[in-house]
Image (tube, helix red, strand yellow):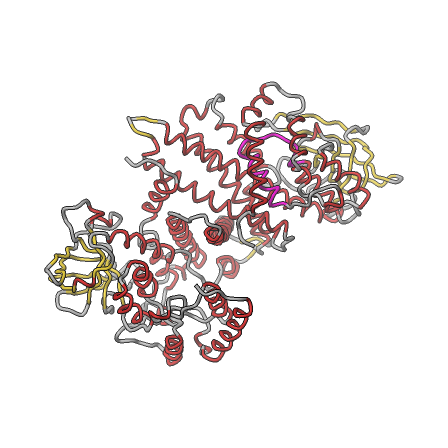
């Protein structure tokens, strides 16, 4: 498939850019941060996103979705990356809807997917238990009890945990990766405590403690881990699209600053020491663009290369966004390290996005393993 | 332009496949493995095997040394769809190009674009038939990155130009029949506007060459000296004093040619074979992420080539992007070559007596030139920053 977006996808991207520019610029994130907003996102804007169909793009028509595909959803992520928009789109649509669609039975899909598509259900994934991404190291237990299960354990870095209506909890019924399964937990259920954490990027994250919490198995026992792995690869690509938007915006703002700022009587962008570093960043971003579009298409084509592509993309995008956001601050000089200037927000978001679902180091190692060394 | 229906294309594919199957000798069905595998043509052609000769002559007679060039100039006259099929069918059996030359790669495209009808009729058929070995005269000892400062003079003597000066890095000048050359025709004008593009016969008094030995031990490069050499005025290509336009066009062509080199064994296979695995991971913990990072960058660069072509088809101009490809491809090539030397340890630094010994060490030395020839990496970064990013000049 040609590595370009089609007309429909371009229209979606353009309308996303328009909405986000007006309703959710970086200043909106600053406002959420400074007012210590209890929800950490704008529910009104979330409803508008749902009305525009963004929450339904990857959901099959049979479950109230648009079945538009992930390439389109990726364009929205890229635009949200440019404006650093805080919303439950990643947790609920990229991770929640994807995993429910992959693993859930018909009844579960019927009860959850239409609500996600309408924007009335926020879903969070409770996966991590340690400080570094490790989907195999799960010690939260799930014990069969009556019709359902009882879960106990502690989860960290649960994105949008404190605003979720439903949690998808990763827990263990037996040893090994096959013993790792997925469970639906209602956020109001007894024994569940959710503590909001304040993160560097001013986005939502929570620590979730489960003490004998009643839960419903998502799909079939023994099939959870495979669905989790596939969902994570899809979500890594979605996150990479967001990071691509973030790095492009930080880069473009920096280039504009190099043309505007004068020192020694000339524009600082005329200095070769800065020009070459800018050209290097341009080159790395070009590679990222190609990986992201190829990977997004691989999701929609259900390609057998999905895992390798997700791995390469998250690694390369992770490496590049650190380069670009660091250089962006350095090239902005003194103003770059002030809170008043927005460029610092990009660096902060980059760091949290790096940690999410495996950073550059994690994916470099994983890619080597996938290639047999 | 002729239109091609799906049926026509199917027929063309079947015919091409059958013809190649019948006419491409088995030994020509593999990529070039060494310099001897390349046939350069020229007035004193040298074939390294009977098969090479046979393959060249059959393809020449079919017009398929230059499959997409117009038939009236000796090309194959294939349209876009046919040319795509042709390339696919060649790749299917791994058929190597029957002829490789600067005439095909550079001068031909320039003449098709800038040449007069007389020049096209005179020179392009010779290029297609591999009868003339062309070399390129661009750089001078004092004009490397600052190519436009070149000093080789061409004086207007009425019916001919009188040429004096020196060129450097003229590949295969010692074997070439003719040279396409940048010369200064107006010394008074600003440097970019006093240059012309001329064609000069190498077989004349007043032209001498001297080979240059590189750090790799050998090279096709020469110095070329012009001492009252002559060329008729009809050998001026394009407009007088507007040679820089052609030079830029050709540099873009050249840059897209220098990039990632194909390798016989992948880096990771070489590393696994030589270094081995411990608990399933490469036993050199430093090299492992270096190789991994390189593999990702290589895959991403290939995808970027693909994406850029797709964007061009969709009407977005690639612009100065060839500078990016030249920069990134050659840097990756250097990294790869360096890692191979590291992987192979002592064998990696073996030099040997003959040029075909010590391939890793010599190859690594040779790649150092990749980011210099055809415009240095630094010049490429200048082009990206000015022409793509629009950063100001001083």
**Residue A74 at x, y percent in the picture:** 59, 42
Residue displayed at 47% across by 70% down: B90
* B209 inside magenta stretch: no
Along the line of sight, the residue nearer the viewer: B232 or B42: B232
Residue displayed at 59% across by 40% down: A12
**Residue A246 at x, y percent in the picture:** 52, 35
Residue displayed at 33% across by 26% down: A262
Q: Quadrant of the C terminus of chain A?
A: bottom right
Query: Looking at the image, which residue sits at the far front?
Result: B2
Q: Is residue B319 above or below residue A332?
A: below
Q: In terms of secondary structure, what is the magenta stretch mainly?
A: helix
Residue displayed at 66% across by 42% down: A57
Along the line of sight, the residue nearer the viewer: B134 or B277: B134
Asked whether, in this view, residue A27 is left or right of residue B394, the answer is right
Q: Is residue B11 above or below residue B290?
A: below
Q: Is residue B299 above or below residue A217?
A: below
* A74 inside magenta stretch: yes
Residue B287 shows in the view: no
**Residue A257 at x, y percent in the picture:** 40, 30
| Residue A205 location, quadrant | top right
In magenta, the rendered stretch is: A70-91
**Residue A120 at x, y percent in the picture:** 73, 32
All told, the count of numbered labels is: 0
Asked whether, in this view, residue B276 is left or right of residue B68, the answer is right
Along the line of sight, the residue nearer the viewer: B71 or B342: B71
Q: Quadrant of the N terminus of chain A?
A: bottom right
| Residue A141 location, quadrant | top right
């Amino acid at each position: 498939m040609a590595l370009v977006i089609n007309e429909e996808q371009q229209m979606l991207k353009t309308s996303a850019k328009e909405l986000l520019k007006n309703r959710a610029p970086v200043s909106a994130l600053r406002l959420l941060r400074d007012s210590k907003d209890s929800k950490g996102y704008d529910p009104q804007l979330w409803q508008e996103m749902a009305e525009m169909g963004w929450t339904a793009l990857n959901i099959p028509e049979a479950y109230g979705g648009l079945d538009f595909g992930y390439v389109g959803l990726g364009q929205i992520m890229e635009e949200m990356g440019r404006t650093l928009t805080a919303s439950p789109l990643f947790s609920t649509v990229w991770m929640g809807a994807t995993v429910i669609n992959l693993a859930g039975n018909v009844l579960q899909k019927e009860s959850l997917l239409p609500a996600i598509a309408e924007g009335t259900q926020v879903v969070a994934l409770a996966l991590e238990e340690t400080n570094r991404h490790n989907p195999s190291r799960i010690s939260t237990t799930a014990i069969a009890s009556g019709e359902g299960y009882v879960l106990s354990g502690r989860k960290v870095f649960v994105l949008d945990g404190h605003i979720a209506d439903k949690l998808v909890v990763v827990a263990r019924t037996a040893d090994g990766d096959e013993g790792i399964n997925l469970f639906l937990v209602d956020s109001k259920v007894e024994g569940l405590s959710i503590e909001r954490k304040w993160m560097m990027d001013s986005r939502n994250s929570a620590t979730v403690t489960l003490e004998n919490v009643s839960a419903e198995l998502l799909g079939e026992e023994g099939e959870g881990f495979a669905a989790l792995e596939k969902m994570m690869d899809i979500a890594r690509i979605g996150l990479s699209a967001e990071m691509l938007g973030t790095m492009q915006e930080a880069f473009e703002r920096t280039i504009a600053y190099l043309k505007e700022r004068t020192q020694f009587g000339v524009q600082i962008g005329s200095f070769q020491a800065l020009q070459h570093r800018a050209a290097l960043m341009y080159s790395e971003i070009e590679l990222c663009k190609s990986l992201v579009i190829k990977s997004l298409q691989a999701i929609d084509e259900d390609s057998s290369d999905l895992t390798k592509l997700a791995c390469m993309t998250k690694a390369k995008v992770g490496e590049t966004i650190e380069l670009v956001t660091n250089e962006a601050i350095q090239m902005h000089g003194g103003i770059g390290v002030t809170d008043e200037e927005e460029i610092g927000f990009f660096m902060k978001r980059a760091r949290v996005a790096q940690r999410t679902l495996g950073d550059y180091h994690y994916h470099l190692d994983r890619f080597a393993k996938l290639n047999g060394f | 332009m002729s239109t091609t229906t799906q049926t026509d294309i199917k027929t063309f594919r079947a015919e091409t496949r059958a013809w190649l199957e019948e006419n491409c000798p088995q030994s020509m069905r593999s990529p070039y493995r060494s310099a001897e595998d390349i046939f350069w043509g020229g007035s004193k052609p040298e074939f390294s095997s009977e098969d090479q000769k046979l393959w060249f002559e059959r393809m020449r007679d079919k017009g398929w040394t230059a499959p997409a060039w117009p038939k009236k100039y000796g090309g194959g006259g294939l349209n876009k769809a046919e040319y795509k099929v042709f390339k696919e069918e060649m790749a299917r059996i791994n058929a190597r190009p029957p002829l490789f030359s600067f005439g095909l790669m550079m001068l031909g495209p320039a003449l098709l674009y800038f040449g007069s009808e007389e020049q096209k009729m005179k020179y392009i058929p010779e290029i297609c038939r591999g009868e003339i070995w062309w070399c390129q005269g661009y750089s001078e000892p004092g004009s490397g990155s600052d190519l436009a400062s070149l000093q080789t003079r061409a004086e207007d003597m009425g019916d001919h130009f009188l040429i004096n000066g020196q060129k450097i890095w003229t590949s295969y000048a010692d074997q070439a029949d003719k040279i396409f050359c940048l010369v200064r025709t107006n010394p008074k004008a600003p440097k970019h506007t006093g240059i012309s593009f001329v064609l000069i016969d190498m077989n004349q008094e007043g032209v001498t060459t001297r080979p240059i030995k590189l750090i790799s031990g050998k090279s096709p490069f020469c110095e070329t000296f012009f001492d009252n050499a002559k060329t008729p005025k009809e050998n001026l290509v394009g407009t007088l004093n507007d040679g820089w336009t052609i030079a830029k066009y050709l540099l873009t062509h050249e840059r897209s040619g220098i990039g990632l080199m194909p390798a016989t064994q992948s880096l990771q296979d070489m590393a696994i074979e030589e270094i081995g695995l411990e608990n399933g991971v490469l036993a050199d913990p430093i090299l492992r992420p270096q190789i991994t990072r390189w593999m990702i960058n290589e895959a991403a660069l290939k995808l970027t080539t693909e994406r850029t072509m797709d964007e061009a088809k969709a009407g977005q101009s690639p612009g100065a992007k060839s500078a990016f490809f030249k920069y990134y491809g050659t840097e990756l090539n250097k990294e790869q070559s360096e890692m191979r030397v590291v992987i192979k340890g002592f064998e990696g630094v073996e030099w040997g007596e003959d040029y075909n010994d010590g391939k890793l060490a010599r190859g690594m030395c040779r790649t150092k030139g990749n980011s210099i020839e055809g415009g240095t990496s630094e010049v490429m970064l200048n082009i990206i920053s000015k022409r793509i990013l629009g950063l100001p000049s001083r």
